[in-house]
Image: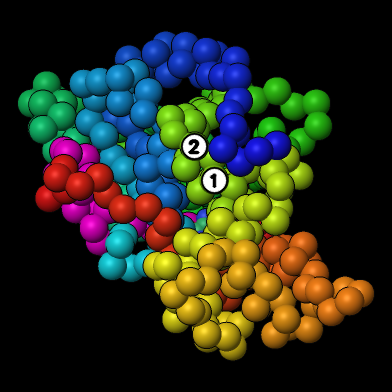
Amino acid sequence: MQLDSLSWFPGHMTKTRRMITAELGNVDAVCEILDARIPMSSRNPDVDELTAGKPRLIVLNRVDQADPEMTKKWAAYFRSLGYAVIETDAKQGGVKQFSSAVRTLLRDKIASYEAKGQIGRVLRVMVLGIPNVGKSTFINKVSGRKSAKAEDRPGVTRTKQWVPVDKTLELLDTPGILWPKFEDSGVGVRLAFTGAIRDEVVDIEELAMRLMDYLGKNYPKAIEERYKLTVAEEDDGYALLEKAGRKRGFLISGGEVDTERMSRILLDEFRGGKLGRFTLELPPEGESA
Ligand code: G4P
């Protein structure tokens, strides 16, 4: 599939939209998990409209893989739009700040519950996220839940799940899939860079070439150090892929570089954090704090 034409027919989204709307009355807040490397591309912008009026928390997850300076900028950007924001590495790091962030976000609500004599009333938070942002890992970490994802087990239909965090906080783990929204062609490309779109459905060399191009322009030092090459001004992604492949000795007959092999290596190393920490998109200009 051509990268620029990546899209999905959002059939499942209809079901998910219905579920979000139906459950909204049962929760106090909505928490959206985003991939800190691609905070915009990993959002589904419909969530804003669907959850209008609910207090909102954004979790920038995978901060261990993102550029720390850029994560600060993204957090400031979302705060300037009125969201509460926390930054997490759900895989290795702690997620303790989640409960206190929810309680701060809902302090007026807690006060009004208490005014009605409902001391210690359970707060309920709907958790949303497109696939691969780390939603399951995050929920498991926050709640101490050990179970595997239900949708990973054959024959198991996912139903809605209330997951207790502590005595006064519960999460609604949403069934149904929240798809990303391919509003511009860059969204599909960035999702593919991070592995959120399976490599089987994209042209791996085109993907790697685009990634090299981006890294060569924005993070040349990382490429130079990792692949022991020099990034020249005129080098495009393909030229860099060839240079890296040559350095690694990935040659095929006639001394040509095996760019397909190098493509897989680049994507693996990028996703595995071997090249460093990168953020692949900037907060929109003029709107940031
Ligand atoms: P999802 O429910 O949103 O689809 O994502 P899930 O939690 O299944 O996470 C997808 C992969 O991302 C998992 O890796 C998980 O460990 C990893 N992950 C989640 N959060 C973070 C994070 O903050 N930082 C990093 N570096 N990785 C994260 P996996 O390879 O599929 O599984 P595993 O071998 O790690 O268990």
Hey, which residue is sitting farthest right in the picture? Answer: 253
Residue at position x 71%, y 76% in the image = 245
Q: What percent of the width, then of the height, locates residue 106? A: 19, 36
Q: Is mark 1 within 8 Å of ligand 1?
A: no
Q: Residue at x 43, y 18 (%)?
A: 20
Q: Nearer the viewer, residue 151 or 160?
A: 151
Q: Secondary structure at mark 2?
A: helix
The quadrant where residue 257 appears: bottom right
- Give the residue drawn at x 43%, y 30%: 183
Identify the mark at residue 185; answer none if there is no mark. Answer: 2
Please indicate whether residue 136 sits to the left or right of residue 94 in the image: right
Label 2 neighbour load within 10 Å: few <14, some 14-19, many 20+: few
Q: Amino acid at mark 2?
A: Ser
Asked whether 52 or 280 is in front, the reply is: 280
Residue placed under numbered mark 1 in the picture:
189
Q: Quadrant of ligand 1?
A: bottom right
Relative horizontal placement of residue 197, taking residue 103 as reference (left or right): right
Q: Position of residue 21 (x, y in %)?
A: 39, 13
75, above or below 28, in the image: below
- Residue 95 percent coordinates (x, y): 39, 57
Residues tagged 1 and 2 counted as in contact (Cβ below 8 A)? yes
> Which amino acid does the dot numbered 1 rest on?
Val
Give the image quarter of residue 22.
top left
Quarter containing the N terminus: top right
Q: Is residue 167 left or right of residue 140?
A: left
Specify whether tag 2 is near ligand 1 (CB below 8 Å). no
State yes or no: residue 73 in magenta.
yes
Does residue 190 lie above or below 150 as drawn? below
Q: How far is disc 1 from disc 2 in space, using C-alphas?
A: 7 Å
Magenta segment range?
A: 72-90
Image coordinates for residue 171, horizontal then vertical, percent: 42, 35
Q: Residue at x 33, y 57 (%)?
A: 87
